[in-house]
Image: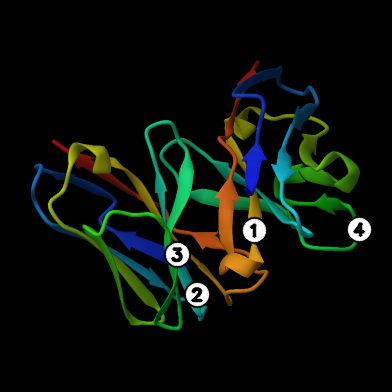
Amino acid sequence: DTAVSQTPKYLVTQMGNDKSIKCEQNLGHDTMYWYKQDSKKFLKIMFSYNNKELIINETVPNRFSPKSPDKAHLNLHINSLELGDSAVYFCASSFNRESDTQYFGPGTRLTVL
Amino acid sequence: AQSVTQPDIHITVSEGASLELRCNYSYGATPYLFWYVQSPGQGLQLLLKYFSGDTLVQGIKGFEAEFKRSQSSFNLRKPSVHWSDAAEYFCAVGLMEYGNKLVFGAGTILRVKS
């Protein structure tokens, strides 16, 4: 069983479209995260939820909206996609929000044309 | 501000040779430190972590890292590199007072020549 899974693995879309990336973890963790890896492979946190509550919201355009229907899922919805949104998006989870290891999903490669 | 520096963008070593990947961090409190590895087209796999205690930590795949507070460093080592170790390696510091967010270095690409 995959511990942290993301769908889709690849996403190709046109500028201006709205898309969602889904993340699920079966580890029983309370905390989940979204990271963005840009074309230079630089990884930066975007959001974090703890037990469905938003706890980290970095400087991210408000076109990006995370949604956590339950603590095992953290989805990322992106409105009005732009070329600069092309990146690999990683979901991660940890047991709690304190001093704990984060386990990463396989990533979703988003390409905006 | 908190930051992580990996001064080497690329490193090439011969198979069987030893490896050291450098990592320096800037952080006011006691750091929680991690090394992750990313193979091409794959996600991030945790190699090892330091939270407290023994400053020499052992990880998976024969890797180890040493935390040196005086040098603000957490270098990754392996005594004998295998071709399958070719990947990109990321050092990260965990900021517990900021909701456990990870701040990553820019990564070091390891190439292994036979």
Q: Which residue is mark 1?
A: B94
* Marks 1,3: beta carbons within 8 A: no
Could you tell me which quadrant the C terminus of chain A lies in?
top left
Toward which corner of the image does residue B72 lie, by quadrant? top right
Q: Where B52 falls versus B110 (above or below)?
A: below
**Residue A70, visible in the rendered structure:** yes
Residue at position x 80%, y 45% in the image: B64
Identity of the residue furthest to the front in this view: B1
Toward which corner of the image does residue A103 lie, by quadrant? bottom right
Q: Nearer the viewer, mark 3 or mark 4?
A: 3
Percent x, y of residue B101: 55, 61
Percent x, y of residue A86: 26, 40
Asked whether A19 or A56 is in front, the reply is A56
Chain on which label 1 sits: B
Q: Which residue is mark 4?
A: B54
Amino acid type shown at disc 4: Asp
Q: Which residue is mark 3?
A: A33
